[in-house]
């Protein structure tokens, strides 16, 4: 079979859709607790909206593309988002501030190219896999462009597939160890977007054509070429609304 990234006919390997490190605390958790608490939130419906650990696809990528090409991006994502094996020169420098009742972080020294391509690689893998948990992701005509960006190691302009980040890092969030199925949404102006809730983070991808008008906050909050990354910290009490929106 042909690898979906390099296009070569090669032996394909087990490739995780969401990198394994993002499930860091999942091994020890009792999923039943989450299932029951989600049932409470969505009026008793029995749902399992979770991406289980070990959700992989053995029909998409060769070893080199998985371990090296995308693997090197993953190593960077792990460092920045989870603070793993950070050298001083790679450490993000973060300042917190408050605006209209919300807390924000702005971190500098976050490599625009690496973090953007790392996050886009998750979106792209979710599209190319047939695994049912990722059915909602359909990049249509954007698939080839995103693949080309990953292949050429080229993150594009800030407003080409911008990504915004929210988090519950600073709140009392009960789902911090869980990865929810990605969901497709539409902005008021008709742009498709996908939200991935991974641990305490929510990554929001806007799959736009370049001439589409994006909401103003996306311009403000997306990853920046000056290597800064902004995060909105969601507040205590917002988790139910988020889960309900993502699950229903
Ligand atoms: Zn390959």
Image (tube, helix red, strand yellow):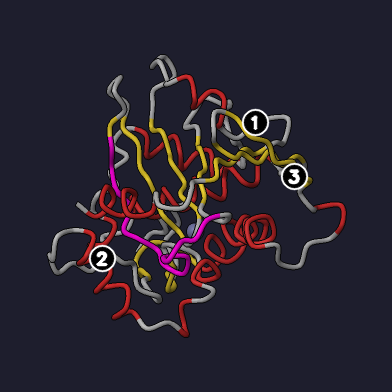
Front of the two marks 1 and 3? 3
Q: Give the range drawn in magenta.
A: 171-185
- For label 2, the residue is 38
Kindly indicate the quadrant of the structure image that contains residue 207: top left
Q: Where is residue 56 in the image (x, y as percent from the top left)?
A: 38, 70
Q: Where is residue 145 in the image (x, y as percent from the top left)?
A: 44, 34
Given contact means CB atoms under 8 Å apart, are the residues at marks 1 and 2 in contact? no
Q: Is 164 left, or right, of 237 in this rendering?
A: right
Task: Kindly identify the residue that appears in the image at 35 percent across and 42 percent down.
Answer: 194
Question: Which dot marks residue 246?
Answer: none
Would you say residue 172 sits in the magenta stretch? yes
- For label 1, the residue is 224
Q: In this view, does 7 lie above or below 186?
A: below
Instruction: Characterize the magenta stretch by its predominant secondary structure.
Output: loop
Disc 1/disc 2 C-alpha distance (Å)? 35 Å
Neighbor class of circle 3 (other Cα within 10 Å; few <14, some 14-19, many 20+) is some
Task: Kindly identify the residue that appears in the image at 40 percent across and 76 percent down.
Answer: 54
Q: Is 207 left, or right, of 165 in this rendering?
A: left
Label 2: state its secondary structure: helix
Given contact means CB atoms under 8 Å apart, are the residues at marks 1 and 3 in contact? no
Q: Nearer the viewer, residue 113 or 188?
A: 188
Q: Which of marks 1 and 3 is nearer the N terminus?
A: 3
Disc 1/disc 3 C-alpha distance (Å)? 14 Å
Q: Position of residue 21 (x, y in %)?
A: 55, 70
- For label 3, the residue is 94
Given contact means CB atoms under 8 Å apart, are the residues at marks 3 and 2 in contact? no
* Image quarter of the N terminus: bottom left
Task: Kindly identify the residue that appears in the image at 53 percent across and 38 percent down.
Answer: 149
């Amino acid at each position: 079979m042909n690898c979906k990234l390099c296009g070569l006919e090669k032996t394909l390997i087990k490739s995780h859709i969401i990198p394994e490190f993002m499930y860091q605390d999942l091994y020890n958790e009792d999923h039943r607790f989450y299932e029951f608490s989600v049932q409470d939130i969505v009026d008793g419906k029995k749902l399992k909206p979770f991406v289980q650990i070990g959700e992989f696809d053995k029909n998409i990528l060769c070893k080199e593309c998985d371990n090296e090409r995308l693997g090197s991006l993953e190593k960077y994502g792990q460092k920045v988002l989870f603070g793993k094996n950070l050298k001083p020169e790679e450490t993000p420098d973060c300042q917190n501030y408050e605006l209209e009742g919300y807390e924000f972080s702005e971190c500098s020294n976050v490599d625009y190219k690496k973090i953007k391509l790392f996050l886009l690689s998750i979106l792209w893998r979710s599209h190319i896999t047939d695994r049912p948990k990722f059915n909602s992701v359909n990049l249509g005509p954007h698939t080839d462009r995103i693949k080309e960006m990953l292949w050429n190691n080229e993150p594009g302009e800030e407003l080409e597939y911008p990504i915004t980040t929210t988090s519950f890092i600073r709140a009392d969030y009960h789902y911090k160890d869980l990865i929810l199925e990605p969901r497709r949404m539409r902005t008021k102006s008709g742009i498709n977007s996908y939200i991935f809730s991974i641990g305490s983070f929510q990554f929001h991808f806007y799959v736009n054509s370049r001439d589409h008008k994006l909401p103003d906050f996306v311009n403000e909050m997306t990853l920046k070429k000056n290597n800064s990354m902004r995060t909105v910290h969601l507040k205590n009490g917002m988790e139910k609304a988020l889960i309900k929106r993502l699950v229903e």
